[in-house]
Image (cartoon, grey):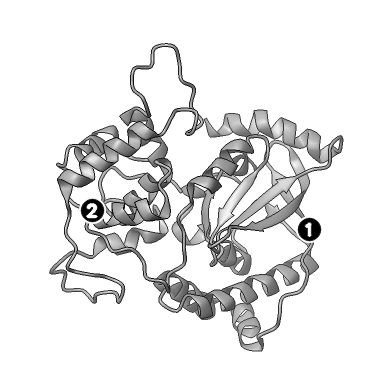
Amino acid sequence: MRVHADDPAAAPGAAPETARGAYRQGDPRARPPWYDWDVAVNSRELAGSLRTWRDRVSPADAGLSTGPRRRVPGLRRQEVAELAGLSVEYLARLEQGRAGQPSDAVLASLARVLRLSDQERAHLFRLAGQAEPLSGQIKRHVTPSVQRILDRLTDTPVTVVDASWQCVLSNAMGYALTGDTTRLPHREQNLAWTTFMNAPTRYVRTDEEERLLRLEVVADLREAWVRYPQDAMLRELIADLRSVSPAFVELWEQRVPPQPTPVTRTFLHPDLGTITLECDILTVRDSDLRLLVYTAAPGSEAAGQLDLLATIGLQRLT
């Protein structure tokens, strides 16, 4: 998840939690049920915690080279800013206690880059005067262990999605395969939305594959709707799909159980052409985050295409 914003008040479409950051004490707009107006920003403690957490993360942990002339024990401020999609100036203000209240989109991005545990992430939100989601909210935090998996799989495309099929994060190979989804409008970063709206995507499928995928998506959204009744973003997604997609409404009302979907997925890459890969979906323990892992059998044509993707595709991202 990348947050292309220099200021917490300017993060349009940056991350799923962005909308929550717009609410402030005294705001006359309707207050969401999860918000707690009693929280306040502890700027001094927030600043100190950010510096401590930054010093704790090694360059190797973040996938960076150390270099011979490195003088800081952890990450440089510039490195954290770049990885989190923030300006160095704004991060400096945060670490000096001069930035006011950061949005929860900014906080979520910093929690990911700084490899915070769930407890540390909750502490970060409290220090910043932002309320953590209630138990009825979908978990979207990428834990340090999941981040390490993405870091290790440098030659394998991996995409992380949440229970609503919202793209949370990909590794470099994932973006090289599917395209940089962070540049898309927020709604088009949701795979359920693109499935029913026929939005432009590199993922191509037959009519039968489309039918099975739609059944799987609707079943997953219905299960998420039951598990996370307080998640406003999920409710909004379902309402939007019901308002614009008769196909979604039909499947939603039928309550049709999902059927086995193909284990392969085909992509049309601008440089490599058609590439068909095996797709395994791994569920993170104690979370509904899912890892979509794309692999190819050794020696196959697809394996050779993945090798090319590691060169050509990554160059496009730089």
- Residue 147: x and y in percent read 52, 44
The residue located at (24%, 75%) in the rendering is 31
The single residue placed furthest to the top in the displayed view is 68
- Residue 185 figure quarter: bottom left
Q: How many marks?
A: 2
Mark 2: secondary structure: helix
Q: Is residue 53 shown left or right of residue 286?
A: left
Q: Is residue 104 shown left or right of residue 220?
A: left
Residue that label 2 marks: 127
What distance separates the C-alpha of mark 2 from that of mark 1? 44 Å
In the rendered structure, which amino acid carries the disc numbered 2? Leu
Nearer mark to the viewer, of 2 and 1: 2
The residue located at (73%, 31%) in the rendering is 307
- Residue 1: x and y in percent read 46, 48
Foreground residue, 198 or 123? 123
Q: Which mark identifies residue 123?
A: none
Residue that label 1 marks: 263
Q: Is residue 158 above or below residue 197?
A: above
- Residue 262: x and y in percent read 79, 62
Would you call the spot at circle 2 few (<14 residues within 10 Å), some (14-19), or many (20 or more)?
many
The residue located at (86%, 34%) in the rendering is 299
Mark 1: secondary structure: loop
Foreground residue, 269 or 280? 280
Between discs 2 and 1, the one toward the N terminus:
2
- Residue 216: x and y in percent read 68, 71
- Residue 196 figure quarter: bottom right
The single residue placed furthest to the bottom in the displayed view is 253
Q: Is residue 237 above or below residue 144?
A: below
In the rendered structure, which amino acid carries the disc numbered 1? Val
Would you call the spot at circle 1 few (<14 residues within 10 Å), some (14-19), or many (20 or more)?
few
Q: Is residue 275 shown left or right of residue 4?
A: right
